[in-house]
Amino acid sequence: MGRMPLQLCHLTSLQILDLSHNSITGTIPKCLNNFTVMAQQKSSYVSISTDYSDYYSYHYYEPTYVNNLLVSFRGKYLEYSKTLGLVKVIDLSSNKLKGEIPKGITSLSGLIALNLSRNLLTGIIPQNIGHMESLESLDLSRNHLSGIIAPSLANISFLSYLNLSNNNLSGRIPTGTQLQTFNASAYIGNPYLCGLSLLKKCVGDEAARGPQTGSKQGEGNIQEHANSREHLWFYASIALGFIFGFWGVCGTLLLKNSWRHAYFRYLERIGDWISVTTAVSMAKLLGNFKTRC
């Protein structure tokens, strides 16, 4: 119970702060950026417990350090040993903290997990939260946060767990490779939030698509008109060909007697030549057939 003491800010070498599941009231101290180890992305050596097993070999107590600790991470407890120097976590979940999230917390670029869920926090998500480049887990669910989701959140490359559900966030979910991989459960409970993950269209999406749809429809109409013109020219060319071809010949024969008589005489000669040629060919074939028989 009670408030978080400001003396915590003097613990500059602190790398794991877990005060979850208490009844802590008041606000989050603004001096969390004093945790200089959490602002470093390199590993730090941590001494957790002692082991006196060397007594029998050296005959006196010479403690050695064992790096082994259970840490709440991504909604479950994980045990860290050899990699504990890389684990930098702040867990203040399930308390009664009020006020805004301190902006200075975004300077902790080495922090890999931040859990402020299940509190009474208000205000906005800090705009510079994208500076927390090492963040892998972020849980701000079940608070009273409002405003838009900070666009810089999409810049965190290693973020693999996100929970912003049950707040008063609004606007469009920022577009980014990481943020699009989280399902709707990371954002539900925010009535005025919209975006692809929620399958809820934002205001203006239809208007944005409108001109594009109209453009595509216009292109379709243009193409249809072009096809119609092509068909028109095709049939017109057939009609013109028929007129000039048929009437150019037949019309001349009908109008000029001398040409008409010459044309028919020419056809008769061709007919006679075809008949004679056919008769001669048939006679040769019959003669060859009789000879062979």
Image (cartoon, rainbow, N blue to C red):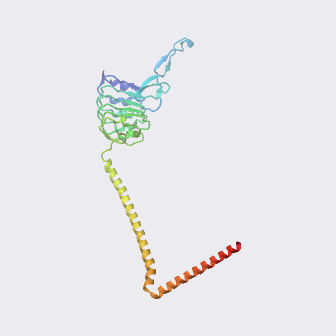
Q: Is residue 13 visible?
A: no
Q: Is residue 103 left or right of residue 56?
A: left
In percent of width and height, residue 204 lies at 31, 48
Which residue: 39% across, 68% down?
232
Relative to 200, say whether 166 is above or below.
above
In percent of width and height, residue 212 lies at 35, 53
Relative to 51, say whether 147 is above or below.
below
In percent of width and height, residue 81 lies at 48, 24
Question: Nearest the camera: 188 or 80?
Answer: 188
* Quarter of image, res 38: top left
Image quarter hosting the N terminus: top left
Which residue: 43% across, 72% down?
238
Image quarter hosting the C terminus: bottom right
In percent of width and height, residue 249 lies at 46, 80
Question: Nearest the camera: 258 or 142?
Answer: 258
Which residue: 48% across, 17% down?
50
